[in-house]
Amino acid sequence: MEILAFGVQADEQPLIERAFQGRAQVRCLDVFLNEDTAPIAAGHEIISTSVNADLGAGVLEILAAGGTRMVAQRSTGFNNIDLTAAERLGLTVARVSSYSPYSVAEFAWALAMAVNRRIVRASTRTRDFDFRLHGLMGRDMHGRTAGVLGTGKIGEAFTRIAHGFGMRLLGWDVTENPVCRDLGMTYVPKDRLLAEADLVTLHVPLMPETRHLIDAAALKSMRDDAILVNSSRGGLVDTAALVGELRAGRFTGVGLDVYEAEAGLFFLDKSLEAIEDDTLARLVTFPNVLVTSHQAYYTKDAVGQIVAATAENVLDYRAGRRSANVLVPRS
Ligand SMILES: NC(=O)c1ccc[n+]([C@@H]2O[C@H](COP(=O)([O-])OP(=O)(O)OC[C@H]3O[C@@H](n4cnc5c(N)ncnc54)[C@H](O)[C@@H]3O)[C@@H](O)[C@H]2O)c1
């Protein structure tokens, strides 16, 4: 039985092939799953999908009609999957509930420090033999306040690094993490965190109740000189409102690894096309903004763990075993 893997990056492919070696035959495709590409899956009982796959009801119906029975999603987040439709269609859906949180936390820090210390601008200048310093002044992190929204696995890893910098730690979450508390974190209401933090970082999942967690009012309540980092999901931030604040000259820096309309753009080469998304086009023009294309998880360690867990999810399905990674059926 051949497993069809959609949305495979070139340097991810050998890791996937190694994870399935001797266990199942796998064919890797670089195309992403959507309504146009779903018919390719016909005849494949098991498929594997990546973070930006469209697993809405329409695509799931095409998959089910073609004989697909199991979807092995290669990510933690599953906001792109219509679980109710999957259940109705009798599909099994599994994800990777945990892998190296350090991959994402360390990248969030890379974004924070890159915008704080103007690393990209400095590199561009030195390539042009412009060795002046004006405009490159950053701020010490030591002694400043980190505000961590979502103190689960990634938020905790981020907090450990913030502690290493010698920062004051504020947290916001529905449940308090004892490790973060032991590091000195004080849990406060979101409004207070946003008003006091020099660095605001987002690590909550995207759900109906967290959509636009950072909306126009939240942005207004932040310090003018704050740094905002989003390495969780684009939908947590109202990007149009963020552009409005940036136009007004606010914020020391904004680092975004995710963008609410990233599907159909991120992971693809659009360099020769006219970009129709005016919000994204405006966003990348600000000198204090850094946008990366959902690469925070993209380390050898994390991707190795993701594909190994995906192979286990597939073997569990074939053996009729249920693991904590199964999202559907729900029980
Ligand atoms: N950019 C990337 O490459 C990348 C990779 C992996 C994960 N992520 C994102 O990071 C997110 C966090 O991952 P994690 O492994 O730390 O998850 P986690 O489940 O360990 O932590 C999430 C935290 O959010 C809190 N939370 C949930 N709902 C909340 C709400 N309504 N209000 C306040 N807090 C709430 C939970 O209590 C938990 O502490 C994922 O959901 C995913 O969206 C991004």
Image (spheres, rainbow, N blue to C red):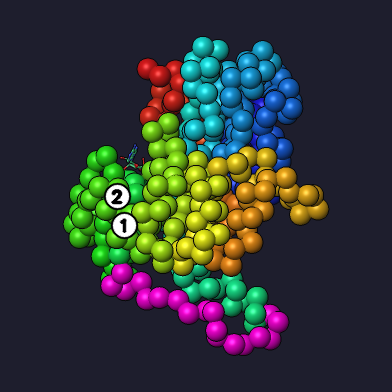
Q: Nearer the viewer, residue 145 or 80?
A: 145
Measured Cα–Cα span from mark 2 to mark 1: 6 Å
**Residue 128 drawn in magenta:** yes
* Screen quadrant of the C terminus: top left
Residue at the outermost front position = 248
Question: Which contiguous range is marked in magenta?
Answer: 127-144
Q: Are marks 2 and 1 in contact (CB under 8 Å)?
A: yes
State the image coordinates of residue 246 (x, y, percent, origin top left). 53, 59
Q: Is residue 9 visible?
A: no
Q: As shown in the figure, which amino acid type bears the numbered disc 1?
A: Ala
Q: Which residue is mark 2?
A: 191
Residue at 55% in and 85% down? 133
Q: Is residue 187 visible?
A: yes
| Label 2 packing within 10 angstroms: few (<14), some (14-19), many (20+) | few
Q: Is mark 2 within 8 Å of ligand 1?
A: no
- Circle 2 SS class: helix
Residue 32 against residue 153 in the figure, above or below: above
State the image coordinates of residue 321 (x, y, percent, origin top left). 42, 22
State the image coordinates of residue 163 (x, y, percent, origin top left). 28, 65
Helix, strand or loop for the magenta stretch, by majority: loop
| Label 1 packing within 10 angstroms: few (<14), some (14-19), many (20+) | some
- Quarter of the view holding residue 42: top right
- Circle 1 SS class: helix
Q: As shown in the figure, which amino acid type bears the numbered disc 2?
A: Asp
Q: Nearer the viewer, residue 142 or 50?
A: 142
Q: Which residue is mark 1?
A: 195
**Residue 320 drawn in magenta:** no
Residue at 66% in and 32% down? 33
Residue 202 against residue 62 in the figure, above or below: below
State the image coordinates of residue 207 (x, y, percent, origin top left). 42, 33
Residue at 36% in and 54% down? 221
Residue at 59% in and 87% down? 132
